């Protein structure tokens, strides 16, 4: 762990305890990330990401862009200083409850398909409007969502078509799909009560790959992130095409780093475990390095 | 159909062991042929896809992912030993692996 990271986490956990009643001691002691409560899990990932963001900023590492994977949007917006840490917690809480309320009433499901392209998955779905590709992670991996029976049917067909792996996920809220339209409307009302600031780094929308530079863009994207499909492959590609050759994954683990192995381009992905390598390399021009000279 | 040369099996074995050791952050000495990639190493299908890409590039293999996927459905490979065995079949038969029983 990099210098100060544990202090950041403790401080953020204390702030989360105050803001949303998080059990800071329990959350911080859950080292394996296997939280029983989905909301607590989202808080933990958000706190971790914000702590890494603090480390990056303290190191003088300034990004050209930022983007948030799924619910990572809130941490990305906090990093870009559009929202405060506490506002992020509040947005997570509101989104989670709205989505849960809608999802609880119907038998939804989410599945992941590995080994088929988006086009092959579209062919499998074959115009069935009851199911959506909610995220394309890379050229071989995507998420689908819809009613449970439809999701299971498509997963079964994907396996027959040669998908290396198909998995029905244990959480049932179909994020990023039109099934969340009702939740998105309530979330829009809530977002309208917040003061959102212009981002200090351009933020790439995972919904439509817009480069967002104003608070209005951000406010719209917050809502779109609830009920519109996202595409991480294209989001990364926009940044790669713009010349980005270094990415830092701020969330725990290295799932984005691993997903990126199936995204074309000449780039490297760092995370907290190997961030020191990046900071001590000549690939970054940061104030921290400059001060050392 | 690719020709299996002397030393290919050893080379494949070394690459597979080194790959899982690095990806799963486990000492190579702790890995065995009967190590279950999913249960023991918490590995996943992306790792398998990555390994396949490595071998496609290394040996210039003409094999489609979907063909391998159809073979995997019939012959699941969950241990390191089984993955080495399947890799050898892919190298040897490429797209014709689908014709194997």
Image: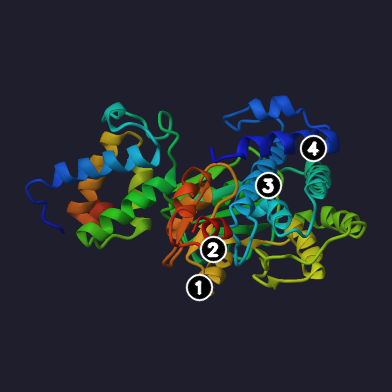
Q: Disc 1 or 2, which lies upstream in sequence?
A: 2
Position in image of residue A117 (x %, y %): 48, 62
| Same chain assignment for discs 1 and 2 | yes
| Same chain assignment for discs 3 and 2 | yes
- Indicate which disc residue A175 carries: none
Report crowding for label 1: few under 14, some 14 to 19, many 20 or more residues within 10 A (C-alpha): few
Position in image of residue B10 (x %, y %): 15, 41
The answer to whether the residues at label 4 and label 3 have Cβ atoms under 8 Å apart is no
Q: CA distance from mark 4 to mark 3?
A: 12 Å
Q: Which residue is mark 3?
A: A50
Q: Disc 3 or 2, which lies upstream in sequence?
A: 3
Residue B38 versus residue A110 in the image, above or below: above
Report crowding for label 4: few under 14, some 14 to 19, many 20 or more residues within 10 A (C-alpha): some
Q: Disc 4 or 3, which lies upstream in sequence?
A: 4
Per the image, label 1 sits on a secondary structure element best described as: loop
Is residue A278 in sight in this rendering?
yes
Q: Residue at x 11, y 56 (%)?
A: B3
Q: Which residue is mark 2?
A: A233
For discs 4 and 2, the disc positioned in front in the rendered view: 4
Q: Residue at x 85, y 54 (%)?
A: A187
- Indicate which disc residue A243 carries: 1
Q: CA distance from mark 3 to mark 2?
A: 23 Å
Q: Which residue is mark 4?
A: A15
- Say left or right for A98 vs B44: right
Is residue A140 in sight in this rendering?
no
Position in image of residue A160 (x %, y %): 44, 51
Q: Residue at x 26, y 34 (%)?
A: B81
The answer to whether the residues at label 3 and label 2 have Cβ atoms under 8 Å apart is no
């Amino acid at each position: 762990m990099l210098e100060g990271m544990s202090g950041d986490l403790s401080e953020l956990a204390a702030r989360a305890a105050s803001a949303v009643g998080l059990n800071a001691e329990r959350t911080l002691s859950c080292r394996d990330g296997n939280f029983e409560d989905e909301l607590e899990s989202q808080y933990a990932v958000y706190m971790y990401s914000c702590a890494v963001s603090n480390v990056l900023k303290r190191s003088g590492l300034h990004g050209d862009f930022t983007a948030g994977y799924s619910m990572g949007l809130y941490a990305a917006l906090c990093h870009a200083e559009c929202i405060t840490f506490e506002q992020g917690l509040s947005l997570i809480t509101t989104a989670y409850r709205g989505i849960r309320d809608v999802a609880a009433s119907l038998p939804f499901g989410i599945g992941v398909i590995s080994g088929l392209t988006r086009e092959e998955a579209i062919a499998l779905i074959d115009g069935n409007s009851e199911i959506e590709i909610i995220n394309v992670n890379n050229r071989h991996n995507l998420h689908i969502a819809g009613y449970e029976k439809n999701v299971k049917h498509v997963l079964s067909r994907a396996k027959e078509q040669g998908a290396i792996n198909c998995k029905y996920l244990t959480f049932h809220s179909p994020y990023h799909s039109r099934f969340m339209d009702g939740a998105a409307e309530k979330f829009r009302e809530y977002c309208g009560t917040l003061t959102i600031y212009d981002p200090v780094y351009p933020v790439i929308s995972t919904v439509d790959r817009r480069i967002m530079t104003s608070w209005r863009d951000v406010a719209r994207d917050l809502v779109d992130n609830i009920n519109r499909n996202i595409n991480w492959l294209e989001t990364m590609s926009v940044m790669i095409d713009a010349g980005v050759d270094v990415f830092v994954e701020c969330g725990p683990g290295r799932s984005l780093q691993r997903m990126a192995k199936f995204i074309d381009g000449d780039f490297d992905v760092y995370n907290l475990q190997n961030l020191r390598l990046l900071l001590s390399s000549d690939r970054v021009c940061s104030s921290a390095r400059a001060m050392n000279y | 159909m690719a020709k299996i040369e002397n030393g290919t099996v050893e080379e494949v074995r070394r690459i597979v062991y080194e790959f899982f050791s690095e990806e799963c952050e486990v000492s190579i000495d702790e890995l065995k042929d009967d190590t279950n990639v999913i249960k023991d190493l918490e590995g996943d299908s992306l790792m398998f896809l990555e390994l396949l890409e490595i071998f496609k590039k290394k040996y210039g293999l003409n094999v489609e992912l979907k063909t391998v996927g159809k073979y995997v459905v019939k012959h699941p490979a969950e241990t390191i030993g089984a993955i080495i065995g399947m890799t050898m079949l892919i190298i040897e038969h490429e797209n014709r692996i689908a014709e194997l029983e």
